[in-house]
């Protein structure tokens, strides 16, 4: 077999061309769904800003903002665990269809919430929190399913890495799409209320396309082989899962802890961009436009990181990309923390550059590998389950980061925030060194000889 360094672009994509429309359909359905997933996750920052400008601090207080953000993260965690288990038990196809359908309905429900005048039981923040929780269930299910479906669609390790990078790159496009749409709606002169409702409702559009595409997909061949093997061996699915997890727990500890540490600083910085970049605009519309512009620029850095990662994954192992990526991020955070001791009030432009570099480094390294590895190093019978557990750990890290970020910034400043992020990245280096495998096997081989 040729190594990744010996393959040119045509050879890497050759397995896809040979398989034809079936594989291409799976990848398209996965990419569109993950685009919607990213859009729904990252649009809430702009929506919360608009709601605060429209209704004021009395209704959209700090507690209300935290509630709307954290409930969706809780839904994402539940969705990752539930749909990961469901995909390994009933199959990839129908679990994939369910996540898209749930995302469509929940995104529309979010856009229909209204201010009832009640600050307690059924007020606007609580309505949005409940709808965002349901949306989080669908979005969370996309993580293990998109990774599992795309990994099982391509047998070759080199081609699989690039295809999964393509899927994850929809994360950057989703962030950019949310920002550009907000800028467009403000520019054409729509009211604040119409803007936030359309921003939330638009997330249902790509999810509806994904739903239609997935309805016509066939079941994964790897899953069907796994189910046939269970029947021949006369073993229940639960017995096989328990046995497999018992032997794979060190790998699961590695993928889960690495994802948790990465998301602690990814979401704490990314989801609260508007609190980092404080601007004084002449109107509410100008402020929304400015914050959307900042988000669009940082998303561009993220997309460039994905493009670099798309090339690196052909020439470097997953282990190397994750190890060196965490190390580089740790150095960046620590340097920025030290610099802010002497420059306590940097300009928005300098903070934009720092945040852009962070997104660039993440998406050319740890953000890719923490998503790809759980779909490559676990057997088919627990692939989606283990990916769901790993991803859920990541969202727990995101919850911890977004909960702690405002408090650390308020009492200790951004210097302490960047120092804490550097420490988390340094711990990621240690986790990668001790708990991440140095190589990946072909998926069929993995079912016979687990790492």
Image (tube, rainbow, N blue to C red):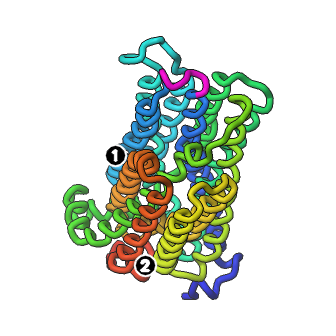
Numbered tag placed on residue 82 in the rendering: 1
The Cα atoms of the two marked residues, 1 and 2, are separated by 27 Å
* As drawn, 132 above or below 118: below
In magenta segment, residue 57: yes
In this orientation, does residue 285 appear? Answer: yes
* Residue 343, horizontal then vertical, whole percent: 59, 62
Is label 1 or label 2 in front?
A: 1
* Residue 170, horizontal then vertical, whole percent: 61, 54
Which segment did they paint magenta? 53-59
| Residue that sits furthest to the top in the current view | 117
Numbered tag placed on residue 441 in the rendering: 2
Left or right of residue 426, residue 194 in this image: right
Numbered tag placed on residue 169 in the rendering: none
Neighbour tally class for label 2: few under 14, some 14-19, many 20 plus, Cα within 10 Å: some
Q: Secondary structure at mark 2?
A: loop
Neighbour tally class for label 1: few under 14, some 14-19, many 20 plus, Cα within 10 Å: some
Q: For this rendering, which residue is in front, 10 or 262? A: 262
């Amino acid at each position: 077999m040729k190594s990744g360094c010996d393959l040119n672009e045509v050879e890497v994509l050759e397995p896809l061309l040979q398989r034809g429309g079936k594989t291409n359909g799976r990848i398209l359905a996965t990419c569109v769904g993950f685009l919607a997933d990213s859009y729904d996750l990252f649009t809430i920052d702009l929506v919360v800003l608009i709601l605060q400008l429209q209704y004021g601090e009395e209704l959209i207080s700090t507690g209300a903002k935290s509630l709307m953000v954290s409930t969706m993260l809780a839904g994402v965690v539940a969705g990752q665990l539930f749909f990961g288990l469901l995909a390994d038990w009933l199959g990839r196809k129908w679990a994939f269809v369910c996540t898209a359908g749930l995302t469509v309905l929940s995104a529309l429900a979010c856009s229909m919430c209204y201010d009832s005048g009640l600050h307690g039981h059924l007020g606007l923040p609580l309505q949005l929190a409940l709808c965002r929780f349901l949306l989080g269930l669908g979005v969370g299910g996309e993580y293990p399913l998109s990774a599992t479906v795309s990994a099982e669609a391509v047998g070759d390790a080199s081609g699989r890495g690039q295809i999964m990078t393509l899927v994850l790159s929809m994360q950057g496009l989703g962030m950019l799409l949310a920002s550009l749409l907000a800028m467009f709606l403000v520019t054409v002169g729509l009211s604040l209320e119409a803007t936030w409702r359309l921003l939330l409702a638009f997330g249902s559009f790509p999810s509806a396309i994904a739903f239609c595409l997935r309805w016509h997909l066939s079941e994964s061949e790897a899953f069907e082989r796994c189910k046939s093997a269970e029947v021949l061996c006369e073993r229940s699915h639960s017995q096989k899962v328990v046995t497999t997890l018992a032997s794979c727990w060190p790998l699961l500890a590695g993928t889960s802890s690495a994802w948790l540490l990465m998301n602690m600083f990814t979401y704490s910085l990314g989801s609260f961009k508007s609190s980092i970049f404080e601007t004084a605009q002449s109107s509410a519309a100008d402020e929304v436009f400015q914050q959307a512009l900042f988000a669009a620029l940082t998303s561009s850095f993220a997309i460039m990181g994905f493009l670099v990662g798309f090339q690196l994954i052909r020439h470097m192992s997953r282990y190397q990309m994750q190890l060196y990526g965490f190390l580089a991020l740790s150095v960046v955070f620590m340097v920025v923390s030290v610099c802010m001791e002497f420059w306590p009030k940097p300009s928005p432009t300098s903070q934009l550059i720092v945040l852009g570099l962070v997104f660039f480094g993440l998406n050319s390294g740890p953000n890719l590998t923490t998503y790809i590895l759980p779909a490559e190093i676990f057997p088919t019978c627990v692939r989606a389950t283990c990916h769901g557990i790993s991803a859920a750990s990541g969202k727990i890290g995101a919850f911890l980061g977004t909960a702690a970020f405002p408090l650390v910034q308020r009492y200790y400043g951004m210097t302490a925030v960047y120092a804490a992020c550097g420490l988390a990245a340094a711990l990621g280096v240690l986790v990668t060194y001790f708990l991440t495998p140095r190589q990946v096997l072909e998926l069929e081989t993995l079912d016979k000889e687990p790492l």
